[in-house]
Amino acid sequence: MTQTITLSWTTICPLDRLEPDRGVAALVDGAQVALFRTPDGLFAIDNRDPVSGAYVLSRGIVGSRGGVPTVASPLHKQVYDLRSGHCLDLPGVAVARHDARCRDGLVEVRLRQEG
Amino acid sequence: MNGGDLVVIGNGMVGQRFVDALRARDPQGRWRVTVLAEEGRPAYDRVRLSAYFDGVSESELNLHTPHDGVRLRLGEPATAIDRVRRVVTTAVGEYRYDMLVLATGSYAFVPPVPGVELPGVFVYRTLDDLAAIRAYAQGRRAGAVIGGGLLGLEAANALRLLGLSTDVVEFAPRLMPVQVDQAGGAMLRRYVDDLGVRTHLGVATTAIRSGPDGGVAALALSDGGAIDAELVVVAAGIRPRDQLARDAGLPLGPRGGVLVDATCRSADERIWAVGECAAVDGTCHGLVAPGYATAEVVADRLVGGAATFPGADTATKLKLLGVDVASFGDAHGTTPGCLDVTFTDPATRVYAKLVLSDDAHTLLGGVLVGDASAYPTLRASVGGPLPAAPLALLAPDGGGADAGALPTTAQVCSCNAVTRGDVDAAIADGCTDVPALKACTRAGTSCGSCVPTLKQLLDAAGVAQSSALCEHFDVSRRELFEIVRVRGIRTFSRLVAEHGRGRGCDICKPVVASILASLGSGHVLDGEQASLQDTNDHFLANLQRDGSYSVVPRIPGGEITPEKLIVIGEVARDFQLYTKITGGQRIDLFGARVEQLPQIWRRLVDAGFESGHAYGKALRTVKSCVGETWCRYGVQDSVGLAIALELRYRGLRAPHKIKSAVSGCARECAEARSKDFGIIATETGWNLYVGGNGGFRPRHADLFATDLSTEALITLIDRFLIYYIRTADRLQRTAGWVEALDGGLDHLRSVIVDDSLGLCAELDAAMARHVATYSDEWRDVLDDPDRLRRYTSFVNAPDVPDPSITFSQERGQPVPAGDSQPARPLPTDGHRRQPVTLGLPEVRR
């Protein structure tokens, strides 16, 4: 059974503050979130690399694998599906994903807690 | 008898092979083995002896593997055999035997020429001989070799590498008279002439004359001529070492050697002989392959087997002085009625001859000079029908001799005795490319001449060798480089739209970033380029395991003033950074958070530092020793050259990081031969080494050119680097690149020295542009508010330090706190995801 806890939307920054195909780190309700602007849209996932424990996913290279938008951990290059948070290289490994949107030129993020 | 005390006299290549073979067949250790070795070091690869002068270390030549139940007595030669008491005597003691194996090898034949005992006259047999030659060559300029056979030419190359002018005196009318015919010898001589080695054929040395210092000074020749020679190597042939057997009353062969039958057993049923000291049915064999065969025969016999000597395979394939030479089967055409088919091309300097049976249907033997690529197929076909029409077989590219036609027993790699069957088995086990085959079979890891054959065998096995970079590009890095260069593409988006698919990934994006940087496309963080960079290049610092970065300012050549040292110390203290001297003579400052980087650079840049590019696939460091400025032994200004080179190549992006070093003398304190390019000073110039690697698979650099002026040196390095940058695979080091080049170092020489591809002007121009447009990446960021905006911890809280980066103290300095890292702060009820148990992370290449 999956329980999803959602919090309210938090305004992060103007959209033009995000470079295309690159990530930034943001603090949302005390949590570190990696936020990405790609041609497929905005994506937000936990900034913590679940393999190394370091808070670095926002600094990974953005791209695609088989049409899926991805980011590669900058530490040991495991690739994550930006839409689902699933690691495409290590079965069973995933990173939490969050909601991201752009309203009136401002980027907003809402944390999701899945269990 | 099938066990007991076994004594082996000799620990050369064959002696060692015998012990290995016996141990493999006698795992219970029924034979208690004692090996008596004359030399102070265990068995080494004597076939590759000359590689010692090319920078290959003693340990790389080592062939010895310790075995349980084998006693190795180094430096303890046998002095007598008592066949009645069954005891071998040494200077130290006696060893009783139930069986005795003689593996005493051969000695260099020294003709009884007057003066042969003078200081400065050497033979070429052992590592000690080579060390003595090297030491004696110091400060001398003229050398000569007596003997123009295989060993003589190797010795000539060694003298050349030691910087001596070199003459070769050969009694026969051609070089390598045993292996090569008259026409092949003539072609070989043209190559040798080009190397500046002078040959004197059909003449004998009548006397060796001394000079004022009592050492050798000249050779007198039978034609009345004379040669200046301060160092002489005698390589006039070998003789079996059979004195022990002779003294023990054992029968010998007609031309010496312990007479043994096809089982390698002597007239005494308890004594066997293997290798070059054995006269098998009366004939001695001076090659390692028949020697190994005798070792296997005796090992088999000692465990009750019935092996017999299969006959000597005298085929040889060599790379002498950079020239391919091969000879196999009845190379001299001594079979009655045989026919010759020959091919001579003076332009490409290729000579090939096939010896055929009188009906022209059966291959009997042949000679190849200049291009031996057809050797594996031809050699394996001896005694059978021709695998193709003779002219097709002799085509210079070996086009008619595809490796796919090889029998499984054919030896693909003669250096490491790897057969086609071994390679096919490795392919069946999952090897899908040449590097995997090299790692799995050792084929191609020595001289590299069989690498093209390995590729053919992969093709023959139906293994498609993809050169695709990743799922987004079907081409290799090299092809991508050409596309970007020729079409003038300057953005990733256009490149992937026109020549690829998808959105790119962490493999192709940094490759394209590097290509764009190499082609002079502005700052690495300009515009769209920023999104292509690996995090190191993106933040111009080195990402460390805890998410912090390290900063390495450039210290060219490793030379630094006290004032600058103090600045680094102050910066480290003020930002509480961990400091460490790196392996490349730089100072690494660890533990900086993203938002601290510009502040740290500001302090460093103001003090005159610049980016050391320690984050990039770029030139990292040029190390140096202190050279002649301070050192008692230095012969040139190694610091000055290292600084000049580091400043010239700073910022140069490449397929892999590049390191260099300059040593001021042959003592090599800067370890230049473990670098991508290394320079060692000589009294008359600089020696350039390329393709070394101190990384995962250490490799000594190859000597590329000698006694260069500083200007000539820099020109060669310029071209070497640009050619590498343009043509190497992704993440391919110079070491792997040089090894993978078809034609290896010779190809490289032809391209960047002889300009065989007409590329040199372009390579020179590319480097000139790099040098002219260099600007410090740190300063460029500090001068640009847009770029500076990237250096924040959180986009919505730029001044909040990343709370996950914390430190503890170790040996008085901060280090990552490790397990005490704070958990991710949780927003509300502390609900947490379950920890995930992981295997080892997969590391993709």
Image: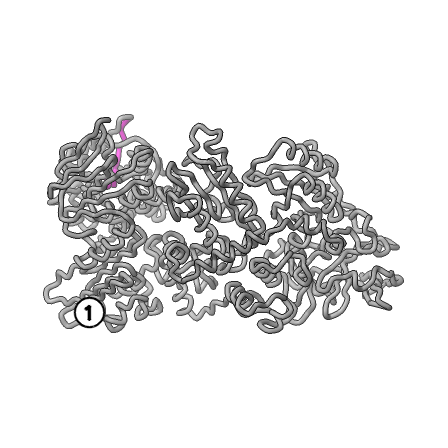
Is B311 left, or right, of B675 in this rendering? left
In this orientation, which residue lies closer to the viewer: B465 or B324? B324
Is residue B102 located in the magenta-colored stretch of the structure? yes
Q: Residue at x 47, y 64 (%)?
A: B432
B250 is higher (above) or lower (below) than B449: above
Region rendered in magenta: B93-105
**Which residue does the numbered mark 1 point to in the structure image?**
B362
Q: Visible in this render: residue B305?
A: no
Query: What percent of the width, then of the height, locates residue B437?
Result: 44, 59
B96 is higher (above) or lower (below) than B794: above
Is residue B305 located in the magenta-colored stretch of the structure? no
Query: What percent of the width, then of the height, locates residue B453?
Result: 37, 63
Q: Residue at x 37, y 56 (%)?
A: B754
Q: Secondary structure at mark 1?
A: loop
Q: How is the image coloured?
A: one colour
- Toward which corner of the image does residue B85 lie, by quadrant? top left
Q: Amino acid type of disc 1?
A: Thr
Q: Quadrant of the N terminus of chain B?
A: top left
B76 is higher (above) or lower (below) than B202: above
- Toward which corner of the image does residue B400 lie, by quadrant? bottom left
In this orientation, which residue lies closer to the viewer: B652 or B534? B652
In this orientation, which residue lies closer to the viewer: A68 or B307? A68
Query: What percent of the width, then of the height, locates residue B434?
Result: 44, 60
Q: Quadrant of the C terminus of chain B?
A: bottom right
Q: Chain for mark 1? A: B
